[in-house]
Amino acid sequence: MKRLMALLTALLIVPAIAFAQIKGLEGILPAWLLTSDLIYYAILPFLVFMLVIWGFLRRIGVFPGMINPLIAFFLTAALIPTGAFGYLVAILYSAGINFGLLGIIVLFLIGIFLLPQGEKFSIVVKERIKTNRAWRAEIKSRRKQLDKVKTSVIKESAKSKPNKNKLRDLEKKEAKLEEEIKELKDRLGYV
């Protein structure tokens, strides 16, 4: 799967570079698309921005596995036509070591203050999703039971001499199941 992603990425980048060499893109200087500068001013910054976004998406864990690199790729590619990519590359190279040091400080601060809360939030969201799935499965199970009980009530009522005790028990069970389904729906926030 990773090789396929690398191949798709290469197939998407090569035509974009060729188009940019012919037409030029706002935010990427045509001089940057020469062979030697292409690596330093286009490919490496693109990969840096993509990997930062990808790492952030993996860390927060909102999207499943292989969707993260696609989202990171398209978000990074979206920087190019806006001119933000060229601006970020210019900042990256003009700031040099200061930018790297600032980046390390920012990542350090994010790691200390924001990620623990983000992890807690992510865990809470995952647990909530798991609980909601369990409740939905429980609703489905209770509905099946309710259908069986309703069928039994109809069969018992259709008899020429229905057993009143059995019919009363079935109706109580039906009411109890309907109440349990309503309670589960209320937990899930159904109207």
Image (cartoon, rainbow, N blue to C red):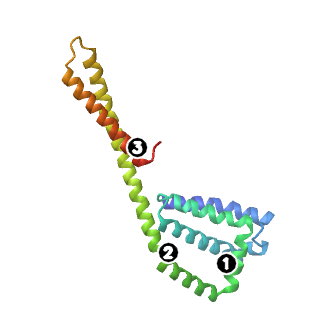
Please tell me which residue is depicted at 62% across the width and 88% down the height of the picture.
Answer: 97
Mark 3 or 1, closer to the camera: 3
Residue 187 position, x and y percent, is: 40, 48
Spatial CA span between label 3 and label 2: 34 Å
For the residues marked 3 and 1, what is the alpha-carbon distance in whole angstroms? 56 Å
Of residues 138 and 161, which is closer to you in this image?
Answer: 161
Query: What number is the disc on residue 40?
Result: 1
Name the residue carrying label 2: 114
- Which label's residue is closer to the chain start, 1 or 2? 1
Nearer the observer: mark 1 or 2; the answer is 2
Residue found farthest to the right: 23
Q: Circle 1 — which element?
A: helix
Q: Which residue is mark 3?
A: 185
User: Residue 131: where, in percent of width, then height?
Assistant: 37, 53
Q: Is residue 161 above or below residue 40?
A: above
Q: Are marks 1 and 2 in contact (CB under 8 Å)?
A: no
Q: Residues within 10 Å of mark 1 (few under 14, many from 20)?
A: some
Residue lying at the far top in this picture: please name it: 160
